[in-house]
């Protein structure tokens, strides 16, 4: 009876029901189910196999009294992760995950599992992340990651839904660029035909330009940063939500961000109830308005607590972790940063102190999720700031020239999708929130 | 009276109405409008300025009898493209574009136009595309491009709406990769820290892997191809819709594509009626099912017409242009291509002839819009095909290894968004359908 199993073609077979559609009301109905084997229990004359599809598991029960010997023997030879189709009949069964089970008539194996995976699909915590990432496609079959990427999908959907309703136009800006956008940050160089070019670290200058023509724009796309550090919150390639809007300032952008976050949480609660329950996850509370702390007030507070920090120093995650304020337990803004800490296109406060700029970071606890500001919309101001930051203004000629044609006042922000998902899911390694993460050590799969 | 105009800050001013909201029912209402000056007519004691925002134009009328001398003189100094706000009063006016005009009380210039643009915003055809691309942000203020990018936005929206309803999960796959995906095509090399890497020419292998975990996936994102040619239908960086689905074959994918196109056209007709009218554009007719021609039948037809072409040769756009068949006037499929013309992951027909594979191109007239196929889902078959195409299988180890764990039968396609927009808008230079195009000659802006 050995080698009864062989791999077959899909041919004319098609799935009739997903796991989510299998229930006791279909009692006696003939179905074709498809998926991969997530678990097998063999009790000799009775075997249970769980077939998992994108919605969950279907219990298949094979008894000596109900199946041919050949079919039983085939099922006995199946291993976890094998991908197959089963033609069979539904029988209601209270104990089964969907309230019904399938009695198999016929089996079609599409692709056999040839090895045992180094982790179990049922595991919540598992082997080290590198072992998992080396077999990422199989790792992603794990229940916890399935749920998390459902939530990721819902988050993207909610963001777009909100922005489209608010009259934003979706844009795509080039990822291959001639010059560094913001100066300072490490870029990946490219060979662009016979020239040197770089991968864009953000759509910054493009989205600003596009407010001239479209006023309100957004992009969701990859950004590239040659991060030299190994941390749990940095990636070399991440997905960024970039928003830019004409005729507003940074206070409007903070309000917009609040609106987006409120809508995301409401959408996930409504559409991914099941996933939240399964993960036993409470979403972060979003109460508007978010607390706002000026950079200066935070420096004061830190100095009063005895920290050795000076006005003008950056606020590290480590520093923020030590902030004791209870209100910093959720989302909050840090506003009005020193101009010297922000890129050249950020607008200094127009009344009074040029040392402070119209800027904010959206934080979740000690995690920076988003960063935004009012931008400079006049050429002379922009040139002055670029020179102060030691940038070669000639290299930005392609950008500066549009400022001769009436760039509107505008403001915007960039938001790291994976960072936001860290806040939403409370997962502390950003790599788990990326399908195929890239960092200084990892370029495959 | 000179230099009465100076640039001012946005401050507390905010727009109260978009152009689309200005109408005669608001007669006498005080409003603040914002935008840029798309046209000025000066008749001495009466001046018209058109203020354009993202929805269209608002007519502002300044008469000696209704405005202060100072305001009149300010308006006299304004140039096209200047960005400003006007506080004023609405008066119904049949001849104005929105059925009402604005009588100005106060003017706030945000950003003056310092130069005359080398093209007019009203122009349909204009100066050479390179002149326009050098000032792309201003070029995009032109009416025709405004409308086209509204349609682009609606197209993206419709695609996502359709796929999400069809239970597809949105994914993002890495753009920095270790090895060439499909072999052959020209790639852009990157310095990835201390290693060599490449920009992904498609999400192909990743989306295939992800059918293991998510079954139905799609991505809309950039792809990179170091195209050496200068044509009107190639870009170095394009936006690709990539779709992959488990437990189906290429015939299901053709049906899915038909469904997507039907939904796109219906959505644009419903949501962008105004833009279609303004562009005087009839969308391509989409009648299901699309005609399907096998590759072999096309070769036969060409040979009968006396063309010097052999079975196994590729079909060039030039060749297809010469096809006389009336049915090739819209969308159609060319199916069942020679296996040798398609990448290694495309599945040969499982019955009979290995020379032919389960593949299709979606064409619009002579333009290839999309390309899809059933994929190989078994390791031995995949290795065999890779070796036949002379690929180094070791370089693909990160991909091949997942085939030990039950890859489902799957099929998918890639669709070039800008190509599709060429079909939809009948615009014949792909650069015009890209905000900031990249090609062998162009890396800026």
Image (tube, coloured by chain):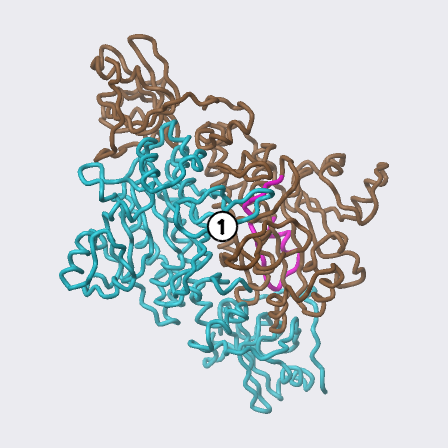
Chain colours: A cyan, B brown
Residue B44 visible, this orientation: yes
Q: Which residue extends farthest left? A: A304
Up/down of B211 relative to B274, above or below: below
Up/down of A95 relative to B296, above or below: below
Disc 1 secondary structure class: helix
Q: Position of residue B231 (x, y in %)?
A: 65, 36
Does the magenta-highlighted stretch encompass residue A2? Answer: no
In terms of depth relative to the viewer, which is nearer, B326 or B369?
B369
| Pointer 1 residue | B160
Q: Residue at x 57, y 60 (%)?
A: B206
Q: Which residue extends farthest bottom? A: A44
Q: Residue at x 71, y 82 (%)?
A: A4
Q: Position of residue B74 (x, y in %)?
A: 26, 17
Up/down of A393 relative to A437, above or below: above
Q: Residue at x 23, y 54 (%)?
A: A290
B111 to the left or right of B430: left
In terms of depth relative to the viewer, which is nearer, A258 or A108?
A258
Q: Residues within 10 Å of mark 1 (few under 14, many from 20)?
A: many
Residue B167 visible, this orientation: no
B375 to the left or right of A134: right
Specify the subunit that label 1 lies on. Answer: B
- The residue segment tinted magenta is B234-257
């Amino acid at each position: 009876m050995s080698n009864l199993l062989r791999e077959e073609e899909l041919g004319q077979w098609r799935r009739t029901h997903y796991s989510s559609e299998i229930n006791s009301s279909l009692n006696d109905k003939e179905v074709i189910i498809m998926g991969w084997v997530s678990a097998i229990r063999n009790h000799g004359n009775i075997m249970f196999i769980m077939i998992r599809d994108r919605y969950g598991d279907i219990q298949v029960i094979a008894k000596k009294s109900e199946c041919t010997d050949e079919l039983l023997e085939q099922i006995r030879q199946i291993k976890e992760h094998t991908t197959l189709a089963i033609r069979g009949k539904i029988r209601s069964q209270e104990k089964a995950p969907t309230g019904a089970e399938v009695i198999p008539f016929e089996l079609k194996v599409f692709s056999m599992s040839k090895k045992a995976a180094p982790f179990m699909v049922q595991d919540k915590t598992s082997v080290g992340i590198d072992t998992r990432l080396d077999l990422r496609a199989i790792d992603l079959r794990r229940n916890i990651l399935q749920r998390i990427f459902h939530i990721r999908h819902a988050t993207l959907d909610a963001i777009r839904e909100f922005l489209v309703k608010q009259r934003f136009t979706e844009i795509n800006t080039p990822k291959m660029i001639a010059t560094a956008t913001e100066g300072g940050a490490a870029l990946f160089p490219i060979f662009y035909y016979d020239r040197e070019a770089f991968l864009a670290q953000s759509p910054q200058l493009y989205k600003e330009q596009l407010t001239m023509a479209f006023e309100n724009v957004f992009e969701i796309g990859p950004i590239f940063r040659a991060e030299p550090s190994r941390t749990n919150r940095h990636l070399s390639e991440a997905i960024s939500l970039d928003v830019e809007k004409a005729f507003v300032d940074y206070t409007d952008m903070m309000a917009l961000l609040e609106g987006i976050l409120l809508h995301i949480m409401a959408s996930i609660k409504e559409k991914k109830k099941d996933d939240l329950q399964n993960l036993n996850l409470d979403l972060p509370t979003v109460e508007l308005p978010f607390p706002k702390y000026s950079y200066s007030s935070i420096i004061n507070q830190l100095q009063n607590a005895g920290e050795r920090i000076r006005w003008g120093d950056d606020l590290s995650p480590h520093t923020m972790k030590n902030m004791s304020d209870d209100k910093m337990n959720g989302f909050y803004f840090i506003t009005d940063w020193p101009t010297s800490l922000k890129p050249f296109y950020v607008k200094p406060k127009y009344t009074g102190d040029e040392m402070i700029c119209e800027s904010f970071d959206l934080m979740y606890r000690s995690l920076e999720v988003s960063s935004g500001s009012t931008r400079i919309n006049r050429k002379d101001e922009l040139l002055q700031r670029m020179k102060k930051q030691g940038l070669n203004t000639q290299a930005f000629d392609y950008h500066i020239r549009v400022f001769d044609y009436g760039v509107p006042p505008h403001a915007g922000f960039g938001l790291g999708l994976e960072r936001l998902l860290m806040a939403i899911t409370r997962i502390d390694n950003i790599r788990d929130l990326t399908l195929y993460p890239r960092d200084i050590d990892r370029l495959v799969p």
